Image (cartoon, coloured by chain):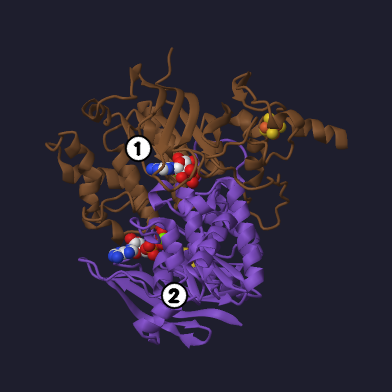
Chain colours: A brown, B purple
Amino acid sequence: MSALLEIRDVFVRFKLRGGVFSSAGTIDAVSGVSLDIEEGKTYGIVGESGSGKTTLARAVAGLHHASEGSILYRGQELVDLPEAEFRKLRREIVMMFQDPIGSLSPRLTIKSLITEPFRIQGMSDRDLEAEAKRLLTMVGLPPEFAARYPYQISGGQARRVGVARALALDPKLLIADEPTAGLDVSIQGEMLNLLARLQDELGLAIMIITHNLNVVRHITDKVGIMYLGKLVEEGPTEEVFARPQHPYTLALLAANPEPDPDAQLMRVELQGEPPSILRRPTGCEFHTRCPFVQLRCSTEVPAWTVVHEGAHRCHFPEIWIKEEALTS
Amino acid sequence: MAVLDIRDLSVSYATPRGPLKALRNASMTISEKKITGIVGESGCGKSTLISSIIRLMAPNAKVGSGEVRFKGENLLARSENEMRALRGTEISMVFQDPMQTHNPVLTVGRQMIDIQYRDKLSKAEKRKRAAEMLALVGIPDPEARLNQYPFEFSGGMRQRIAIAMALMAKPSLLIADEPTTALDATLEVQIIKRLRELQDEIGCSILFISHHLGVIAELCDEVVVMYAGEVVESGTVRDVFHNPAHPYTRALLECDPGHIKVRTRNLPTIPGNIPDLVSLPSGCIFAERCDKRHEACEKRPAMGTAGPGHHAACHLIAERETA
Ligand SMILES: Nc1ncnc2c1ncn2[C@@H]1O[C@H](COP(=O)(O)OP(=O)(O)OP(=O)(O)O)[C@@H](O)[C@H]1O
Ligand SMILES: Nc1ncnc2c1ncn2[C@@H]1O[C@H](COP(=O)(O)OP(=O)(O)OP(=O)(O)O)[C@@H](O)[C@H]1O
Ligand code: SF4
Ligand code: SF4
Ligand SMILES: [Mg+2]
Ligand SMILES: [Mg+2]
């Protein structure tokens, strides 16, 4: 059976305005990403800030143009799909944005905002009053919020309005960019439990982008780790947490702050500065910062290597396990 | 010595249903050269608190009572002009939504040069300093990046630029409202380290709001816990995280998925909702959701002492002493 969403070798390229960078005229913010999202499953995307996660998500949602590659939704090609055609799909594919308040139009009341999807889809015959109430209750906000404006609510409340708006039309694929940032852990739990329930009830597929590794661990089935516009590792979440293959994944997991001031942290220090997307490092693109870098890493590009149910892009997977064995 | 001493601060918002009491008799002390965290339920008044410190409040907000003492002087008594001079020099701010900091139609470089208007440096020197600050917060190609507009950066980059801009002033108080939500864990740790170094170097105090309890544990010396517009507990991070004295704090810590190492699809939550801030309950503000509620809780508890420098507003504390 083919996946609900199949992303194949997708590139998203931005033109640089004259004078910004003296060198090349374009950057590949997403540089050849392939991944599958199954119906009813949650795929987590984590990775370095600026590695292209939001750009990839926006390409799937039809908000950025993919310069190369293919994005198949139920077998239908989304790349270059005319906007009029894409609009029909916006009932099924919805996106929650990273900036909570900034993405809500300041002149509309919360009620107009969360019922806007019905109007856009020509479903204004619905009882919008009742729908607004239903959606607000679903995300744990009192109905009186309907009359407020975005600047009259807190950051976390704006995030919940974003969730209500995204779920208004019972989508099939939810693309959620940092859906729990700004929520306290209790409401974060409520929100994630709600998504899990909808997933069980409606078979919703979720592509979630988050920096919160605690969220990833609990709610995703599969996780992909991005670095400089590419996936460097992918696999079933539990396996990746238990046995990270790529050194960047290891560093990322080790950095997760523990809610205990006396926690003994085993950090993996990354060397150097984050690399330039304009002058991509040769060989393995992580070699300028990898604590385990070897001679061939700076010249030979590591291939995407499939192991069991996962895959990675490193010449020396699990190298730290071997190093530990040597030093102990 | 306290850099910032907030006493009895009450703030409300005018709404069609009547005043919404977003902050009620909040008191807290931010010690010199210390990093103080604020945690609490979404909507508990954290952003309201800091917007009243720097006096950038919503038009419908009103300060009912209280004092905000900064280096001994009550800021609430200062004129708008004096406040403007203080903001961005003595007190810098990183907003929850980085778009609030950035002007969308100006390049980042232009904005970073503009905020140095008080410094007597040449434009080239200011530009150089701006690029150095971007590098400090881990933005690659800082020189070239200065020519770009905010929308050309990722969410986490915009957040880091906001941090860089706030630090340029070398303030004595830095207020940061969830400044690391869009940063990956390795960068977050790096920014925390930079903030700590900076705090050492220029000796500033930091007021740091975050929902990430792990970040609070790692960065902060002290922590203030808020619930529905009130301060319910405060103390050192160690005391509060290891021996929470208020039932809300305990419930909050128990909900943190960071504590739960076995994968679950059903995360713990605190049952119930926060009370309506327009018509408040008369007794303890947390009573409706508290698993330790008893008769005494129909009266509002006063702030009690749970240990040296550790305070909480719950009847259980006084009762424990008399028992
Ligand atoms: N301008 C306004 N008018 C009316 N109510 C407001 C206004 N601004 C905020 N509120 C309400 O005041 C309460 C406190 O809001 P505040 O933004 O201070 O919360 P917060 O603790 O920062 O929450 P978060 O963690 O979600 O950002 C919330 O219930 C919010 O809905
Ligand atoms: N509209 C745009 N024009 C030019 N460059 C852009 C644009 N949007 C993003 N970029 C660049 O593309 C790269 C990837 O950005 P993106 O927002 O996808 O990162 P991200 O992985 O979502 O990061 P974060 O975790 O910080 O949100 C960055 O270098 C960014 O500056
Ligand atoms: S290929 Fe080499 S440099 Fe790249 S991640 Fe693996 S060990 Fe590190
Ligand atoms: S005063 Fe009573 S209701 Fe309030 S937190 Fe303490 S035990 Fe719970
Ligand atoms: Mg992003
Ligand atoms: Mg806030």
Q: Is residue B77 above or below residue A31?
A: below
Q: Quadrant of ligand 1?
A: bottom left
Mark 2 — residue? B87
Q: Which residue is mark 1?
A: A95
Question: Split into 4 quadrants, where in the image is the C terminus of chain B?
Answer: bottom right
Between A111 and A50, the residue placed more toward the observer is: A50
Q: Residue at x 26, y 31 (%)?
A: A91
Of the residues shown, which amino acid type is indicated by label 1? Met
Could you tell me the amino acid type at mark 2?
Answer: Arg
For ligand 6, tell me if the residue under mark 2 lies within 8 Å: no
**Quick check: B90 above or below A207?**
below
Q: Position of residue B7 (x, y in %)?
A: 47, 81
Question: Label 2 is found on which chain of the structure?
Answer: B
In-image side of A83 versus A163 (left or right): left
**Which residue is painted at 59% across and 49% down in the image?**
B187
In the image, taking residue A258 as reference, residue A325 lies left or right, namely right
Determine whether the residue tagged by mark 2 lies in a helix, strand or loop.
loop
Q: Secondary structure at mark 1?
A: strand
